[in-house]
Structures are given as structure tokens and as C-alpha cells.
Image: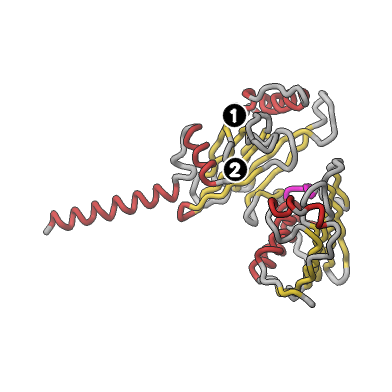
Amino acid sequence: MKKIIFIIIQFVFIISYSQNKGIEQSGDFLDTKFEIEKYVHANSERFKKFELKKINDFDPDKYDYEMDLICKRIGDSLKITENYYKADFDNNSLMDIVMIGDDYNCDESRTISCNFRCLVMMGFPQDLVKIYSLNLSSGCYIPQIIKKKNRTLIKVHHRKIGVLSDKGNNIEEHTLIYKCDGFIDYNEKPVKHFIEKIEFSTSGCYGTCPVFSLVIDKQRNSTFFAERFNFATEEENMKKISSFFNNNREGTFKTVIKEENYQQILELLEYMNFESLNNEYNEAQDDNQSSTLKITYDNGKVKTIKDNGLIGSYSLKKLYDLLFELRKNQKWELKL
């Protein structure tokens, strides 16, 4: 009888250990370049060609030689000598991995090595993995893991857009926290506001960028004005791109935004201190999509942010993502 009980205990222990190992393997049990790359490829269609590289392993680019020099200068000054680092960014006791590498995204074939990419692979319970890019634009984004008020954060260093200098004044820094299902700008003193209305609209671009506008009131009532490229796949849109500009709008739709989605947007707005952001951001490229965000709050106050490039800040980019997703994750009814 004792032998049977001992066998049962051993069996339960083995199952428990294997389950815990499965949950933690996303970060804790990945210890080689090959293992990490394989895991990224298996969990992300977007980064199936991603290759870990140390900063000094990137060859000087004949088209942007100064960018490569700046990347290496930043890396040397911060002593970033490895191609990945481990930390726990969401305090769930599971190791996450910050990765430096090349995502081979220079052309559609993804066979040319040249694109510096900083990724974070987050591990969650039940063996769930999510991969986030810390690049707002082109160029190198070099991560530095820091601690602040018992939180593990990432400070990202990169060259200021459009600023060429060798005097050290051409570097931007962004301190990021994992929050709202993404990496957003760290804020020590969030300000709570009463949001009355959110209005968001996008322009077109040299391609198939979705053109639409959204209005959401404080009761979560929303109107979605779909202009073009909102419903088909990228491939389908490319086939009929010429005809889109001659057709009528795709339609006007209404719904009540789901509580969980609306609260996520409110939480982000409160944390990011939208009131203190610039009124205008400009990436200075002719083919960019642009957006206008208008927030009515606190008894009629209005904050309007125009963003050419949709990358004014990490928090804004996350907010735009949430608003774009509303087109697909709500039950919209066509307004006749």
C-alpha cells in the first residue's frame, strides 16, 4: 500500500513540475540564441525571420552609415554587449526577454539583413506568450533595463528623427512600463480626468491605410464612419486599390462599445496625462498616415492632437492601436 501511495505522489509531482515548466519556459528555460529565435518564430508571424544580433554585429549601412555609428556609440556607452537580457516587467514571477536583433524587413522578400529591431517577449501563465516591438520608427532602439520604485522598466535610447550630430545632443530617451497590455511611457503622477467624448480620425497614405473616424461618448455610444480599406485583408485591398478612390464610403455604423474595451481606453488616457502632450507630432515623411485625436473632458475642456506618422509617443501609439482595434472587435450595426 505504501509503495502505491509513493508512486502516486511521484506521478503527481512529475505532472506538476512539467506543467510549471511549461508555464515558465517562455523566459526561464530559454537560454541560447537558437532556443530564443525558435520560440519567437513559432509565436509571431510578423517576426518569423528575426535573428538575434549584438549591436556591434550590425554591419555599417552604406545608406545610413551615421546611424550605425550612433547605434554603436549608444551601445558602448551603456555597456549593452549581449543580444538578449532577462527581467520580469509585469511582476508575475515569470522571466521576460528583451531582444536585440534583425527582423529582415527591408523588402517584401525579407531576405536582406539591415533592419535593427528591439523586441520584448512576455511570458504569462498557461504558457501564453506575447511579443512586442519597441521600435517606433526606423533605426536602432537600444534597450536598457532599469529599476524605479520597485518596478522593472525599460529605458529606450535612439537617435532623434531628423537630427544629424556627433555632439551627443541627437539622442532621445523614453522610459517605458509594461501596462495596458503594452509598453507605454512611464508616468509617476497620473492625472484622473472625466472623459466626455473621444473623437478620432485618420487620413490615407500611399497604400491601403484604413481611412475612418470614430466618435465615442461617455455612455460608450459610438459611431464608426468607414471610408475605405477597413474590412478587407491587405491582399484584397491591394487588388482593388484603384477602384476604392472612385467608390462611395464603406458605410456608417453604430454600437455601444464593450465595457472592457472602453475601460482599457480610459485607463490608458488617465495614466498617460494626455493633457500635457504636444498638440502636434510630425515624423516628416510624405507617405505617412496621419491622425487627429480630440478629447472632450472635465466639463467641456478640449485637447486636440494631430499626429503625422501615428508615433507621437509610445502611449499615443498604444491608444491608436486600441482605437483601430475597435473596428474589428465590436458588433457594429450598419446605419441606413
Does residue 125 appear to the left or right of 7 in the view shown? right
| Amino acid at dot 2 | Val
The mark found on residue 120 in the picture is 2
Q: Quadrant of the N terminus?
A: bottom left
Q: How many marks?
A: 2
313 falls in the magenta region: yes
Regarding residue 194, the answer to whether it shows in the image is no
Q: 285 and 73: which one is in front?
A: 285
The image shows residue 184 at horizontal and vertical percentages of 69, 50
**Up/down of 291 relative to 83, above or below:** below
Q: Residue furthest left?
A: 1
The answer to whether residue 173 is visible is: yes
Q: Splitting the image into 4 quarters, where does residue 96 fall?
A: top right
Residue 160 in the figure: left or right of residue 130: right
Under circle 2, the secondary element is strand
Give the numbered dot on residue 304. Answer: none
Which segment is the magenta one? 310-314
Residue 3, position in %: x, y? 13, 54
Q: Nearer the viewer, residue 229 or 264?
A: 229
Per the image, the residue denoted by label 1 is 53
Q: Residue furthest bottom?
A: 336
Q: Main SS type for the magenta part? A: loop
